[in-house]
Amino acid sequence: MSALKSLRKYHRQKVWWRYLVAALALVFALMPVIWVIGAAFGPSGLTTQTVIPRVFSLDNFKVLFNDENVPFALWYRNSLLICTSAAIMQVAIATFAAYAFSRFRFKGRRLSLVGLLVLQMFPQLLSLVAIYLLMYRVSLIFPAIGTGSALGLILVYLGGAMGYNTYLLKGFFDSIPREIDEAAKVDGATAGQTFRQIILPLAVPMLAVVMLLSFIGLLNDFLLASLFLQTKEEYTLAVGLQAFVSGQYEQQWGPFAAGALLTALPIIVLFQFLQRYIVEGLSAGSVKG
């Protein structure tokens, strides 16, 4: 028994620094979250000087919904509409493209894959001017899908659907045995029926992962949204909340933090809804049977 205690003591003395590093990393990771929560529930109009406010209040949330100059509910609706629509269409485009690259052999296939990979090397900032000029000219002919419209912003978002998501889904489709396709073909199924009735159900976990990543990326986008959405009523959450720390709402960190917490709610709900599929998707391919 004493030998066991000595062994445990020796083990604690040997690995104590690992627990210290883990604790410091945890504090470092959670500190911004705790600060945002404290600023959101702190007194309105004040910058939180401490992590935990002395007085808890809902004044910052009231500012978001009661101030006539802050159409927060409209920003929330715009974000959900734009991000959900764009994410679903991004997943659809990436799925069709990935399946074609994975299952079909056609001229220019390898060159197209290399082109997609090369395009991902260039930062989004380089294409802003070109995209804006293109959409501005489109708005002169079709104002409904040009600059200053939610539909135009969705179309711009779809331009990036053929990148990382396509590679991610192609890798998953490659892990599905081709014998399944051949068996379905023998049974008389067409390529479309095989895709809809066999491949898609098997790919649901990975589709859930891609859907979540796309939605998070679109919800957090500020650069493109601020470039294309021109009026306050058209803003998304990322663009609208930025007004609280610049311009006429300068340095209102309390309402900004409250809005940030509410912005995280759709991501949390979507994550909980897709959690089972996400776990399966992230672990897909790790075990080969």
Image (cartoon, rainbow, N blue to C red):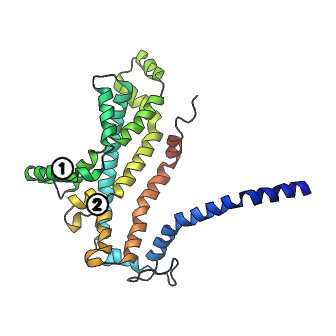
- The residue under label 2 is which amino acid type? Asn
**What residue would you read off at disc 1?**
130
Q: Secondary structure at mark 2?
A: helix
Seen at 37% across and 26% down, the residue is 193
Quarter of the rendering occupied by the C terminus: top right
Q: How many labels sit on residues?
A: 2
Seen at 23% across and 56% down, the residue is 150
* Horizontal and vertical percent position of residue 255: 37, 75
Which quarter of the figure has residue 194?
A: top left
* Horizontal and vertical percent position of residue 21: 62, 61
* Horizontal and vertical percent position of residue 212: 42, 49
How far apart, in angstroms, are the residues tagged by discs 2 and 1?
A: 25 Å
* Horizontal and vertical percent position of residue 270: 44, 53
Would residue 21 appear left or right of 190 to someone viewing this image? right
Q: Nearer the viewer, residue 74 or 135?
A: 135
Seen at 47% across and 20% down, the residue is 179
Dot 2 or dot 1, earlier in sequence = 2
Q: Residue furthest left?
A: 141
Name above or below for residue 204 compared with residue 145. above
Q: Nearer the viewer, residue 110 or 236?
A: 110
Which quarter of the figure has residue 167?
A: top left
Q: Secondary structure at mark 1?
A: helix
What label sits on residue 78 in the rendered view?
A: 2
Which label sits in the foreground, 2 or 1? 1
